[in-house]
Image (cartoon, rainbow, N blue to C red):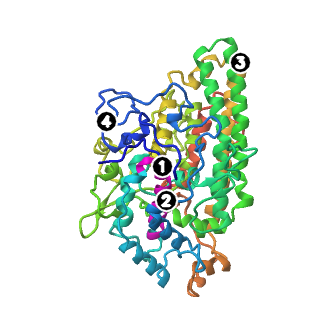
Amino acid sequence: MSRDLTQTSPEAGPSIPSGHFLSLSPSYASPSSSPSVLPSTSSHLSGGLAPNVASLASADFEVDVRTGFLPATRNLTRLPLEWELWESALDAARGTGENGQLRLQGGGEREKLWRAGIETMGVLDTEGLRSSIRLLRRAHLVLTFLLHFYVHTTPAEPTPRTTPLPIPESISVPLLAISPLLGLPPIVTYSDTVLYNFLAPNPSAELSLATNPPTHVITTFTGTKSEEQFYIISALCEIAGAEALKLMRQSLDELFVADEKALKRLAHYLRKLAVQIDRISDITMSLMKSVDPEEFYHLIRPWFRGGDSDGPQSAGWAFLGVDDDAAGTQAENMADRATADGVRGRLFSGPSAGQSSLIHAIDIFLTVDHSANADDDESATPTPPSHSITLNHNPVSTDAAAETPATPSRPNEATFVQRMLQYMPLAHRTFLLHLSTHPTPLRPLVEHYARTHPKLAEAYDGALEALKRFREKHMRIVSLYIVQQARRRPSERIRQILGHSEADDDEAEEVKIELGEMRGTGGSPLFKFLKRCRDNTTKAMIGKPAGPGFDLS
């Protein structure tokens, strides 16, 4: 008999209410039977009943008015004794003892022993985890970190794999059992590294950017200060975004009324939103002082690589001991290649800032259109953005895959924003869907009143300018932390940490890197994607943009 989801776990705190829609399987876990042509937030087990969407800060969306997309309750730092085997294996990988962490692409005795332990470790039962969302979150974090440690301590091969990398049942079986309960894929996500991986200094006080901000990270791959700060700064951006979400909600209230006073208040909220976006930008730029570029590129970023990291023809990872259709995996995530035993590889992307719901929410609210269109060719004539944004609540649809050509096997890169929805928690994905289907989108109203209310149009464009500045600063960070690091040889200190041999030291000082070939950990062509997002933000403006943009090259 399965355990009641409403039971309380003393280790995990509040349990899932019996009527909470998160107690149902995610909508993408199986095709919806709803005949409606409109997007649906309802699970296939909910009888067609969508969650309560009366408020954009609804608890069912896991969006808190004080903390935004960060959980308002304290994150769990360790699983109970029933799953201590997982935690101990993670401790050994992270090197919390005297020997240090496992080495990337290791092949040393320590890596071999650890991997052998994972391969012979038993499959733990996951039924008890269903009693608490906090338990499920921690279990997903631990299992996916174990997954990435196992994958990335595999001895390096001279060429990309032609067969999927087998993942032991001790990881794959429990991971694919709990992932659909959270609506997350079986891989490390932004939620694991940021949302569910921080602590504030005062556990009894309310989380606050000013008085009780995120200051500590629970789990890292490298144990470096740079990795910890990378996650903390992302969490600080999220909590700063709570004010932006509040302003968006207030603005949507005014859109319903749209009288003279409402339009003036709307312009005021948009000006305040621009200030808040700039604040998020400033927090993001603090990376420059807190995160070492070399450490990020050579020591931290490689651990993020997913099963699709070799591009469209990646062999993927083969999760042993589970059916191919387990955990809602559908056509997009299946590789064309299989192991000798016929287990097909799965193509999931590693954690990426693109998996954060915050900037997606701002994009949707400001009606920035990132959908694929003919003007993706930079020489084409720009066209005005559409007045609505389509968000696919079922991003791994077999129907959609069947209607697309057989090659390439991966979706068009222009669908990156929609594809990232798959990597967000179900509640946040549902929030974005609800926001995108708001009956009164912002841009058409601003367009309608642009001549009679020029200050409203200026405020709207001001918010878009702030969003453009955010994307420009993001591009500068990418230039420093990825492009420049990829073009030069790592320092002696980094080479020693990585265990490079003297033969490796004979490589050229500078490496020629084609920007078009570089991919982010989310699987997208890095330069093309960032430039497109910046340009799409500019296209949404009612007036003319202010000045030329930053050139990543």
Taking 412 as reference, is 36 above or below it?
Answer: above
In the image, which residues are magenta? 130-150
Q: Residue 80 has which mark?
A: 2
Position of residue 168 relative to residue 204, above or below, is below
In the rendered image, residue 89 lying in the magenta stretch gets the answer no
Is label 1 in a helix, a strand or a loop? loop
Q: Nearer the viewer, residue 322 or 315?
A: 322
Determine the CA span between mark 4 and mark 2: 36 Å
Q: Is residue 276 visible?
A: yes
Give the CA separation, mark 2 to mark 3. Answer: 53 Å
Instruction: Say which quarter of the image contains residue 168.
Output: bottom left
Q: Residue furthest top?
A: 259
379 or 316: nearer the eye?
316
113 w.r.t. 481: above or below: below
Q: Residue under circle 4?
A: 32
Q: Nearer the viewer, residue 546 or 38?
A: 38
Q: Residues within 10 Å of mark 4 (few under 14, many from 20)?
A: some
- Left or right of residue 85, residue 255 in this image: right
The answer to which image quadrant residue 344 occupies is bottom left
The amino acid at mark 4 is: Ser
Identify the secondary structure beneath mark 4. loop
Q: CA distance from mark 1 to mark 3?
A: 49 Å
Q: Main secondary structure of the magenta part?
A: helix
SS assignment at label 3: helix
Q: Give the mark nearest the N terminus, 2 or 3.
A: 2
Could you say which disc has been placed on residue 264 in the image?
3
Q: Are marks 2 and 1 in contact (CB under 8 Å)?
A: yes
